[in-house]
Structure formats: structure tokens, C-alpha cells
Image: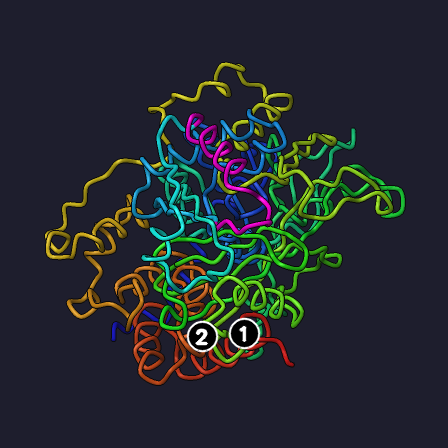
Amino acid sequence: MNPTKPNQPHQQRQQALAPLSHRSSQVEPWDMLIIGGGITGAGIAREAARRGLAVLLIEQKDFAWGTSSRSSKMVHGGLRYIASGDYKTTLLSVRERERMLSEASGLVNEMHYVMPHYKGKFPPPWIFNTLLRVYDRLAGKRYFTYFKREAFLSLNPHIKQDKFLGASQFSDAVTDDSRLVMRVLDEAINDGAQAINYLKAESLITNEQGLVVGATLKDTSSEDNAHSNAQNNVQSYDVYAKVVVSATGAWADTLRMQASKQSEQSFHKQIRPSRGSHLVISQERLPLKQAYTFLHPEDKRAVFVFPWENRTVLGTTDLDHPPLDDSEVGITNEEVDYLLTATNELFNDADLNREDVISTWAGVRPLISEGGDGKRVSPSKEKRDHSVWLDNNLVTVSGGKLTTFRLIALDVLEKCQEVLALDKSVIQNQTINGDYVFSDTTPTNPKFSTLPKALQQRLQGFYGLQLDTLLELAHDEDLAYVTDSNTIWAEIRFAARHEQVIHLDDLLLRRTRLGLILPHGAMTPLISTRLKQICQQELGWDEQKWQQEVVRYQDLWQRYYHLPAA
């Protein structure tokens, strides 16, 4: 092993932090400091950097750690908005879905959805099919198909057949949400942005007029290391920027309250945290080639059962979540039962139970509440629109959908125009460097042509500009799949070397999703042995560090990504 490798992670992090020092004074501030490393923050960084702004993005945990690695993985056009008469939102969402399908094939992929219809149950076929025709018209494509009873059951004999009338099929898209964040960040970095994880905005910096001009940042990369002395040497940085953008999602009220100078008692909180949880089971227990959407028998909420990463996912719930801190979020026993009940109702021969669950995940949606606590509608009925606020030069954005992250970013830039001394046409120009989000790149490494077509498409979508670097780094044995997953070992090596991996969960839960789709969080003897070898080679982890990370990861996985105690 290269003797310089043990110092490599430290050296890489110091290189990432170096720009903070030379721009830490008020003499040369950043144009934009973005707080929050999810899809919204990444999208803002992408659009700002391509317009020539000096951008620094920070994330207090890992990139996509919050909602953006825990969504339902769906890039959808908002079919539900048609029913409420909000055609504009649906139109914009559908157009963005089609854009991503075109630009990021392999990362964002079309997926068929099926709505089964039963006699006496809502919605009847004629109503739902009318909505789907409008949905297709907005997309400019024909996706909708209606299957009569016998035709559908001949291909899908495993669903409940009593009083079954037929099924409506339509299309939306599915993605790996965490990889989507990394791909957008790569595009931003390629245009000059800086992005650093495990860097927390401890407090906002204000000038004599009370306007926000920066933030004090704290390095949190060693906070969870029980054997580290880093607590005694925590680095902090005063970073100044012409505009500070808070893209912290469900945590947005915290910095807004600081900027407004109001007390917690007088500050009107806008964010309503809503928890959505999911179960992952094997395809053998419930083999699906398309997604099913249907109404839960208890509360008539829409739920989904869909194929993802060679597994089957059951989701989602929609429940008010307690006030947030910086801790992980996990599923409850009630939610486990709720999702199993719904699935067993439709697939009544499946007889799924807790023993079938490989893993779970739960995330918190940042809903924008429209009423006080006493007047609230259910979380499922809150609008999914985003909002942008300006408080003493702090621009805050929250809400919205994964699908429309680019449009959200453009709205944020327009609000930033009220602070930045820039020609408004620069902000509004969506065609700078071409009207695209994802670069169109063709890898030149000869290893690429030896890969199966499906893997080629996946890697191009996942890694874009970085694919040649990944292939150059890969050993011959790294081009093999990790057991029955869609992930190859080269992705693990690349992430460890180039994607700011600090902890084992960064690698197994976000850079790859092996911790969600493999038993025991992927920590079986055969896999963990090779993981250890790669982490030692690429991250310089010695035996003590590896064992420390394994203990930390297994505790986290058992508490938040598996079943809760019965």
C-alpha cells in the first residue's frame, strides 16, 4: 500500500478547506454562500456557478444526508395537482421530468406506474383516465394505457382479483436521489463552485445595520470519532459573502429566526416537518417490473410499491414529525405495520411480514404550512410548493419537489438579485453555456466499451464528467458487480478517493446504496473484507479506524435503517 495514503484524507480535506482562509476576510467575500448540501442547494450552486459567481456550498453533515437521500426516489410531474386544478405546477414539473429523462438517462429513468381499479372503490377508471390524458397532453407524449381485467391479470396474477375491473398505466421517472445530488454538485464544481461537507453554519455574521454578511462555520468531520482528539482542535472559519442562501429544507426556520433577530416565542415558523418512511424487501418476495400506486385501505392515502435497485420498495407514510435536531430520523413500528398492511391488501398472496424487511429509511419533508397548529390540514393535503424569503439579506428557500430543483434554483437567484449588484439579465438568462443542467460527455477510457450496455448507461448517468476518472482508477476486479446489486466495486473505490467520504455511512448509505439493499447493511463477512481493503487503500484507515467506523455504522444502521424494536 502506498505509504502516503494514510495522510490522504487529511490532505484532501485541508485542500477543500483552504479556499475558506483566503476569502475569509471582508475584503474579498464570496459572491454566494449556500448553506445546505441537498438537491436544492446543489441546484442553486449549479445555476449560480454557471453564471460566473464565486460560490461556496457547505453541508453540516454529508451531502444529501437529509431529505435528499431519503425521498421516494420518484421524479414525477405532479399528477395530483391536476385534480386540484393547478395545471401550471403540473406543466412545469412534467417539463422538468422530461428534461432530466433526456439529459440524465441512466440516472433518471422512465418507470411505468399502474393504478388498479376495483368496483365501488375510488377512483373509478373514467375519472383517473381523464386525468392521465391531460397529464400526457402536458408532457407532449402518449404514456397512458388502459388494461381490461383479463389482459392485465394474465400478466399480473399476483394482485387481488376480487371485484377487479382493470388498470390504468402511466409513466413518471425514478432516480437515485443521493447520486442525483452528487451529479449536480459535480456540474457546479466543474463551473468553479466549491463544495465542502461536514462544515456547519454555527451562526450568522451581521454588519452594523443588522444585515447578514456571512457565517461562522465549524468543521464537524471528527465530531463522532470517539478516539479522536479533534474536539480539542475544532476549526472554525468566519466566511463572508455578498449573499447567504439557506437551503436547509426542513431545518430552514433555524437560520431564518437568527436573521430576523426574533425570539423563538415571537418568530412565526413556516416549516411543517412531515415524515415519510419506506420498507425495502427482496424482489423474490414481491417481484415487480413496474410501480403500483393505490389508496391505503385505512386512510385512503396514496401509497406506492415499486422496483428500485433490484429490490422492491414500499412507501410512503406522511406524518407530522416532532421538532427537528441534528439527529437521524427512523421509521416507527406503526409505519411498518401501515406499509405492510397496504401492500398485503393489494398483493393478497404475498403475506409480507417484518422478517421480509431488508432495510428501512425515513426522511422529513419540508412542507410550507398554510395554517396555525389548530387549523392544519393533514400533511398529505398541504401544498408541495416551494417558498423563498428574504430576511435582512438572508435568502431562505424551502419546500418544493425533487423534480423542480432547477426551477427552484432560478427563483432563488431572482431573489438574490435584490441583494447582489448584478445585471438582472444575468440571473434570468437560462441559456448561459447552453440550456442544460447535465453535461453531455462521452467517456474515452477503453474500459468503457467492455462493459454491458445497461452498466454503461447507468455509469454515464451517475458520474457524467467523472466517469473517465472512475474507470482510470478501477482495478480489473473492480468492474464486477457487488453481489446481486447494480453497483460495481469501482464505484466504491472512486467515491472513497474523490467524493469527500468521511464516515462509512457516507460510503454505504449515500455514495452507494449498498447499506439499503444488502442484508445487515452490507456488512456481511465477504463484502466487509473487501470494503475494508478499499477503505485502507483509498482512505488510509488503519485497523483501529476501520473498527471504529464499523461500530459507528452498525449502531446507526440498526437504529435508523432497520426495523425499530418491536
Q: Residue at x 13, y 56 (%)?
A: 447
For the record, the magenta segment spans 116-138
* 51 w.r.t. 320: above or below: above
Task: Report the front residue among 277 and 557.
Answer: 277
In the foreground, 226 or 96: 96
SS for callout 2: helix
In what quadrant of the picture does the N terminus appear? bottom left
Residue drawn at 69 percent across, 31 percent down: 389
- Residue 353 location in percent, x, y? 53, 76
Task: Determine if residue 365 is in view.
Answer: yes
Q: How is the image coloured?
A: rainbow
Sequence-wise, the earlier of marks 2 and 1 is 2
Q: Where is the C terminus found, in terms of image quarters?
A: bottom right
User: Where is residue 483, by image quadrant?
Assistant: bottom left
Q: Which residue sits at x=56%, y=34%?
A: 29
Q: Is residue 351 above or below residue 120?
A: below
Q: CA distance from mark 2 to mark 1?
A: 8 Å
Disc 2 residue type? Gly
Residue 232 in magenta? no
Residue 311, placed above or below residue 113: below
Does residue 4 show up? no
Q: Under tag 1, what secondary structure?
A: loop
Residue 143 found in image quarter: top left
Classify residue 444 by image quadrant: top left
Given contact means CB atoms under 8 Å apart, are the residues at marks 2 and 1 in contact? Answer: yes
Dot 2 corresponds to which residue?
521
At label 1, counting other C-alpha atoms closer than 10 Å, the crowd grade (few under 14, some 14-19, many 20 or more) is many
